[in-house]
Structures are given as structure tokens and as C-alpha cells.
Image (cartoon, grey):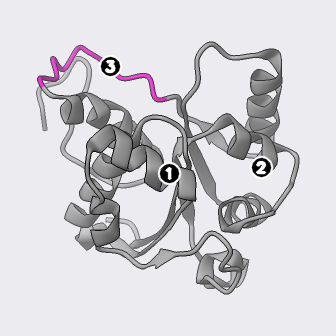
């Protein structure tokens, strides 16, 4: 197995709090593959979580949770050695700030660090339809080494709950991050 991962999770105010919840739950369950996880949430992300999920469970996250203005968080510097950042869900506003190099909060600073260090940035984008501005920003991030992983769930695994449906996206993102997980694979039995 490869070396344990140090992962930053940023949660923006885009709709899709269930994706963030499933991501955090899965990361917690994968502790054997993970050295460290740091979390940063926007204020809007907390509001959306409460509205969509009907709870404040984000207050009980098992990982260190940093304020959006905390530029002393370890992952605000490349020297901390975080190898992956997953922004989930990723709003088009956060995506635009990252694409244009505006590091005005911890999320955008950490993304800037990940890109400049040539590490893995995965953005689980949430928006439809997409404007040309959105597409150009996604192109810029892709050219800089980031991965756009749209929150487009798959249905061939026949998910039965909203969390199972969200997991079809999160499992893809975790695979992109280099983690090994038990998930449905097209054309293969569940391993």
C-alpha cells in the first residue's frame, strides 16, 4: 500500500452538503490510509448543511476544523506536506477565485498551495447549467494540474438512498486521491 495521505477538505456554500457529509464519513472510516485530515468550511457551507441535512453535525466533525481566515493552519503552507485537497462541494465562486489566483481565505490559499506544489487538487463542482465563464475557469484549473470532478452521480450501482447516490461521486474522488476503497466498479463484481 502507498504512503498515508495528508488531505485538506474544504466545504463551500454550494448546494450538495450530502456530498461533504459522505466524504467526511468515508475519510473517517479510512483512517488506516490517512495520516491527517484538515477541514475548512465557509459560513455559507454551514448554512447549506443545516438547510439541506436538517442538522448541525458539522460541529461534530472528527477532524481538526479550521476557520476560513486561519492562515496559520498547517495546509496554508506547502512545507506542511499535504498531498491532496478535495473541495466538496465546490461553488463556482470558489472555483473562479482559485482559477484567477485570488487567495483571500483559507480554502483558496490552500488550493493555491496545492497547485503550486504540483499536488492533487480535486474540485467536486456543483452548478448547472455552466456558463462559458465557469467552463473557462475549469479549463484554467485543469491546465494548472487540478481535477474537476463534477457532482454527477452514477446510477449503474442502483443506489437506494441519497447517501448511496452521493457516494458514487465521493468514491470517484477518493479513487482520484489515490485511496483504496471498496466500491462498485463498472463491469466487475463489487470488490
Snapshot quadrant of residue 43: bottom right
Q: Which region of the structure is painted magenta? A: 151-160
Q: CA distance from mark 1 to mark 3?
A: 24 Å
Q: Secondary structure at mark 2?
A: helix
Residue 177 can be seen, yes or no:
no
Closer to the eye: label 1 or 3: 1
Q: Quadrant of residue 190?
A: top left
Q: Main secondary structure of the magenta part?
A: loop
Instruction: Mark 2 and mark 3 in contact? Answer it, CB < 8 Å.
Output: no
Q: Crowding near pointer 1: few (<14 within 10 Å), some, many (20+)?
A: many
* Mark count: 3
Q: Which residue is rendered at x = 28% and y = 47% of the image? A: 22
Residue at the image point whose x is 58% and y is 17% from the top: 128
- Drawn side of residue 40 relative to residue 181, left or right: right
On residue 98, the disc is 2
| Disc 1, SS | helix
Q: Determine the secondary structure under disc 3.
A: loop
Instruction: Name the mark on residue 45.
Output: 1
Residue 15 in the image, given as x and y percentages of width and height: 47, 35
Q: CA distance from mark 2 to mark 3?
A: 27 Å
Measured as percent of width and height from the top left, residue 37 is found at 42, 72
The residue that label 3 is drawn on is: 154
For residue 105, what is the image quadrant?
A: bottom right
Dot placed on the residue nearer the N-terminal end, 1 or 3: 1
Amino acid at each position: 500500500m502507498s504512503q498515508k495521505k495528508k488531505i485538506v477538505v474544504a466545504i463551500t456554500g454550494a448546494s450538495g452538503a450530502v456530498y461533504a457529509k459522505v466524504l467526511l464519513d468515508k475519510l473517517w472510516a479510512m483512517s488506516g490510509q490517512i495520516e491527517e485530515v484538515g477541514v475548512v468550511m465557509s459560513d455559507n457551507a454551514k448554512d447549506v448543511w443545516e438547510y439541506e441535512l436538517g442538522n448541525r453535525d458539522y460541529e461534530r466533525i472528527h477532524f481538526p476544523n479550521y476557520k476560513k481566515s486561519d492562515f496559520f493552519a498547517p495546509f496554508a503552507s506547502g512545507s506542511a506536506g499535504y498531498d491532496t485537497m478535495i473541495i466538496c462541494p465546490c461553488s463556482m465562486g470558489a472555483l473562479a477565485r482559485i482559477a484567477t489566483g485570488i487567495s483571500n481565505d483559507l480554502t483558496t490559499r490552500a488550493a493555491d498551495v496545492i497547485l503550486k506544489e504540483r499536488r492533487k487538487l480535486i474540485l467536486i463542482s456543483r452548478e448547472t447549467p455552466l456558463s462559458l465563464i465557469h467552463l473557462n475557469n475549469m479549463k484554467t484549473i485543469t491546465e494548472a494540474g487540478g481535477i474537476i470532478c463534477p457532482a454527477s452521480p452514477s446510477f449503474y450501482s442502483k443506489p437506494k438512498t441519497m447517501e448511496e447516490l452521493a457516494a458514487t461521486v465521493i468514491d470517484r474522488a477518493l479513487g482520484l486521491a489515490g485511496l483504496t476503497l471498496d466500491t462498485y466498479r463498472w463491469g466487475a463484481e463489487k470488490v
